[in-house]
Amino acid sequence: MSDQPHAGHSGHGGLGKYIAVFFALCFLTLCSFWTYSDLWPKSLDNDATKRVFMMAVSCLKALLVVLFFMHLLWEANWKWVLTIPASLMSVFLVLMLVPDVGLRMRKASDERLLHAAVPTAATAEAPAGEKEVPGDGHADHGQE
């Protein structure tokens, strides 16, 4: 056996690099737990800030895994031709769906609000003409 590294693994840097990435992933996991601990700064104590911080930590962890453990750091430059457009399209798709998902109940009908999983102020009282059917807990919608 020769002591020469294999041609496909010559630039991977050895075990030390993977151990460093492992400890970086452990530290980033601790950062995720930090957001909901008592040590989190009170000036940043709102849900939106915590979610943005955790999303940034999650993206950084995913980047480390993809670059080192999936060996994309040592791939040829063609990987950027495939990943950058796909990433941009996925971000674009998410941003285009945010208003649709976030505002979907703004113009909901009374019937949809009545059958919503979480009651809202509009569903506090059932619309006129509906009566409870004994035994099954569902409202009668004029169907005989």
Image: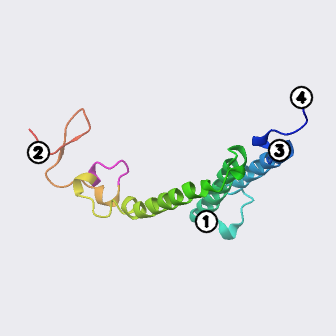
Asked if residue 102 lies left or right of residue 137, the reply is right
Where does the magenta region start and end? 113-119
Query: What is the spatial separation of the Cα atoms under label 2 and label 3, in whole angstroms?
Result: 67 Å
Name the residue beneath numbered marker 2. Answer: 142
Question: Tag 1 or tag 3, which sits nearer the N-term?
Answer: 3
> Rounded to the nearest whole Å, what is the CA distance between mark 4 and mark 1?
55 Å
| Residue appearing at x 71%, y 52% in the figure | 73
Q: Quadrant of the N terminus?
A: top right
- Nearer the N terminus, badge 4 or badge 2? 4
Give the spatial CA distance, label 4 vs label 3. Answer: 26 Å
Residue 40 is at least partly visible in this image: yes
- Please report whichever mark, 4 or 1, sits nearer to the chain's N-terminal start: 4
Q: Residues within 10 Å of mark 2 (few under 14, many from 20)?
A: few
Q: Which mark is residue 1?
A: 4
Residue at left offset 75%, top offset 59%: 39
Sequence-earlier tag: 2 or 3: 3
Examine the rendering and report whether any part of residue 37 can be seen: no
Tell me which label, 4 or 3, sits earlier in the chain.
4
Select label 2 or label 1 by which is in front. 1
Residue tagged 1: 49
Reading the image, the residue beneath label 3 is 19
Residue 139 versus residue 24 in the image, above or below: above
Out of 106 and 72, give the one closest to the viewer.
72
Q: Residues within 10 Å of mark 1 (few under 14, many from 20)?
A: few
- Distance between the Cα atoms at labels 4 and 2? 84 Å
Q: Measure how far apart labels 3 and 1 are at the Cα level.
A: 31 Å
